[in-house]
Image: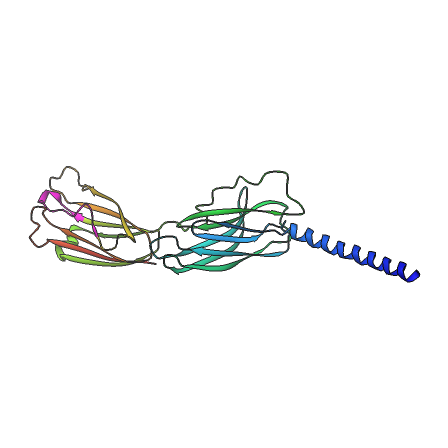
Amino acid sequence: MKKVIILACILIILSLGLFACNAGEELTLANSLPFTVSGSYFELSGNSAIYSPNTTYDFNLTIRNDTEDEWRGKCYVFLIDKTGPVLDISDIGINLLNKGDQESTVIRLVLPADIKPGSYGLALLFPDKGHFIQTIYVGENIPDVPAGPWPNISSYKQSPTRLIQEELTIDDFIKQQHHSWVATVDVGDNIVVTLGSNPSTGFKWPDIAQIQNQGILKQLDHKYVKSEQTGMIGAAGKEVWTFKALKKGTSIISMEYRRPWENNEEAEWTFIATITIN
């Protein structure tokens, strides 16, 4: 009888221990439920635990090309609060992706020891596509105050637009009838071409330039600027074109200075620009 009682006590103790282990495991799992969010060109997964200061967390990011064209670029990852970015996490270079291709990477978030408890946004910024923000919570519990609203981060990390210019005067073309120009620019740069012109002679440059590859280079504007020598009849002015570098690659801009009614005649002057976009 005594042995039976001892055995029963052992079984009860083991059962309580097993229950305690299972309860602890369930509690841990409940605080680290996985999440996956996706857009047309990315998928982000991690866990929804309440994040702790001075701790490292990993997220999986898959980037997809959802367009017909080749795609390469950047993805900036950072942590934000209601006032703006508070922590740079990663700059991810996107390799050349054809339609349907994808690549995966791990985002490692290292929370500093002195970060304040509260709601934060794990922000993904694709400068040429858009941005996404996943809410996370730092501290011992979820704050009562709603997360956000988050600030506009679309311009964060974007380099200021550069202006690349080339200018040739009437005198330049009188000395040399045909000019070429080679320039290397970055995606997003504006290219301005200014060429001497005198419409009073019947000659003019085209309003719309010939662009070899309009998928990577786009004309934004064209205008004629009168001579600063006001009051002088027949004074030469200049024509100005503005182009935008859209994507990486090489494109050629070509223009001819001619009388519109003399299409079969050789152009008086020509201008050719070879633009390489990095």
Instruction: Give the percent coordinates (x, y) of residue 75.
Output: 45, 54
Q: Where 242 falls versus 100 (above or below)?
A: above
Which of the two residues, 87 or 34, is positioned nearer the viewer here? Answer: 34
Question: Which quadrant is home to the C terminus?
Answer: bottom left
For image coordinates 75% across by 54% down, the residue present is 19
Q: How many marks?
A: 0
Instruction: Give the percent coordinates (x, y) of residue 182.
Output: 25, 59
Q: State the extent of the magenta-drawn residues as a range.
A: 196-210
Quarter where residue 220 is shown: top left
In the picture, measured across the screen, residue 136 lies left or right of residue 74, that is right
Instruction: Give the percent coordinates (x, y) of residue 143.
Output: 64, 41
Which of the two residues, 64 or 122, is positioned nearer the viewer here? Answer: 64
For image coordinates 64% across by 43% down, the residue present is 142
In the picture, measured across the screen, residue 235 lies left or right of residue 126, that is left
In the picture, measured across the screen, residue 94 lies left or right of residue 267, that is right
In the picture, measured across the screen, residue 276 lies left or right of residue 103, that is left
Q: Indicate yes or no whether the magenta region holds residue 209.
A: yes
For image coordinates 47% across by 45% down, the residue present is 153
Instruction: Give the percent coordinates (x, y) of residue 4.
Output: 89, 60
For image coordinates 25% across by 55% down, the residue present is 213
Question: Which quadrant is home to the N terminus?
Answer: bottom right
